[in-house]
Every structure is written in structure tokens, then in C-alpha cells.
């Protein structure tokens, strides 16, 4: 393919001229114009390649960000639902104790820092054990999911 060529007169540093000669020898070009054309085309190719890499990087980053956001959204939803459940249960307990205190004609209480009843200690230990068991079951489930 014989393309129309335009004449160009340039001045270059000795270092650039040496570089042109090296490329001319390495690629067996017949003249310096072909070397300059090669360098320009190579530059264009690399610029397009760089753009492609930037585009791919941005696409991958967006995909990762979206995935992380979705995972966080799911985790936050679980936390919110758990918190709502805890708030509801706490309110129920407060209402039950209020009714119990009213029926028993109890006007005031003694706090656990002053005197803790054995039943409270039993309840604390039971709840702590339930939390630990639930956590272990969740860790086991997550471990199985990772193996799949």
C-alpha cells in the first residue's frame, strides 16, 4: 500500500538521532521518515492502549464498588433488623415490668449494683451462652459458604 507522503524537515538532538538510527537498524527501515512514522504510530497505539487500560480500570473499580456497596447494604439491613427487634423486645420487657410493679404495688427498686439476685446472674449467664452459641453457628455457616 503506497500512501501519499509529505516532506518534513526537522532538527533533532544527537540523542534523538541516535535513537532514530537504532530503530532504523532494529526494524530494517529504509529511511528516517519511515522511522518517524513508526514512532508516531507506536505512540498512537500506546495512547489508545493506555486509554483502554484506564477504561478497564474504571469499569473494574465501579464493579467492585457496586459489589462492596451491595454487601454493605445487606449487612446494614441485617443490623437494622436486629436492632429493631432488640428495641421491640426491650420495650415489651419495660411494659411487662411496669405492669408487674403496678400489680405488686412496688414504688421503687434496688439496682443490681447494690444487690443482684441469683436469678439475674442465671439469666445473664444463659443469655451470654445463647449469644456465644449463635455466633459459633454463624461462623460455621460462613465457613461452609466460603468452601462452596
Image: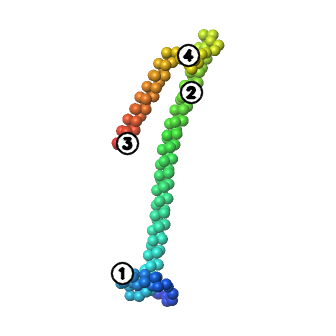
Q: CA distance from mark 1 to mark 4?
A: 92 Å
Chosen colour scheme? rainbow
Q: Are marks 2 and 1 in contact (CB under 8 Å)?
A: no
Q: CA distance from mark 2 to mark 1?
A: 79 Å
Relative height, residue 14 to residue 84 (above, below): below
- Residue beneath disc 4: 115
Image point 46% across, 65% down: which residue?
Answer: 52
Q: Position of residue 40 (x, y in %)?
A: 47, 78
The circle on residue 26 is 1
**How many residues crowd around disc 3 within 10 Å: few (fewer than 14), some, or many (20 or more)?**
few
Mark 3 or 2, which is nearer the eye? 3
Image point 36% across, 38% down: which residue?
Answer: 144
**Looking at the image, which is closer to me, 57 or 22?**
22
The circle on residue 146 is 3
Q: CA distance from mark 3 to mark 2?
A: 33 Å
State the SS at label 1: helix
Q: Position of residue 77 (x, y in %)?
A: 52, 38
Classify the position of the C terminus by image quarter: top left
Image point 40% across, 32% down: which residue?
Answer: 136
Image point 41% across, 84% down: which residue?
Answer: 21
Q: Of marks 4 and 2, which one's residue comes earlier in the chain?
A: 2
The circle on residue 88 is 2
Mark 1 or 4, which is nearer the eye? 4
Relative height, residue 98 to residue 10 (above, below): above
**Looking at the image, which is closer to me, 107 or 41?**
107
Q: Are marks 3 and 2 in contact (CB under 8 Å)?
A: no
Q: Of marks 3 and 2, which one's residue comes earlier in the chain?
A: 2
Q: Of marks 1 and 3, which one's residue comes earlier in the chain?
A: 1
Q: Position of residue 132 (x, y in %)?
A: 43, 29
**Looking at the image, which is closer to me, 8 or 5?**
8
Q: Outermost residue toward the top?
A: 104
Amino acid at each position: 500500500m503506497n500512501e501519499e507522503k509529505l516532506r518534513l524537515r526537522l532538527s533533532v538532538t544527537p540523542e534523538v538521532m541516535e535513537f532514530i538510527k537504532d530503530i532504523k537498524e532494529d526494524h530494517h527501515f529504509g529511511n528516517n521518515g519511515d522511522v518517524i512514522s513508526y514512532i508516531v504510530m507506536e505512540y498512537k497505539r500506546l495512547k489508545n492502549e493506555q486509554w483502554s487500560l484506564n477504561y478497564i480500570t474504571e469499569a473494574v473499580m465501579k464493579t467492585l464498588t457496586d459489589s462492596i456497596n451491595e454487601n454493605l447494604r445487606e449487612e446494614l439491613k441485617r443490623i437494622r433488623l436486629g436492632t429493631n427487634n432488640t428495641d421491640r423486645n426491650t420495650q415489651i420487657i419495660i411494659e411487662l415490668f411496669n405492669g408487674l410493679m403496678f400489680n405488686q404495688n412496688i414504688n421503687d427498686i434496688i439496682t443490681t449494683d447494690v444487690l443482684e439476685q441469683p436469678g439475674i446472674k442465671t439469666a445473664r449467664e444463659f443469655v451470654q451462652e445463647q449469644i456465644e452459641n449463635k455466633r459459633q453457628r454463624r461462623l460455621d455457616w460462613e465457613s461452609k459458604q466460603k468452601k462452596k
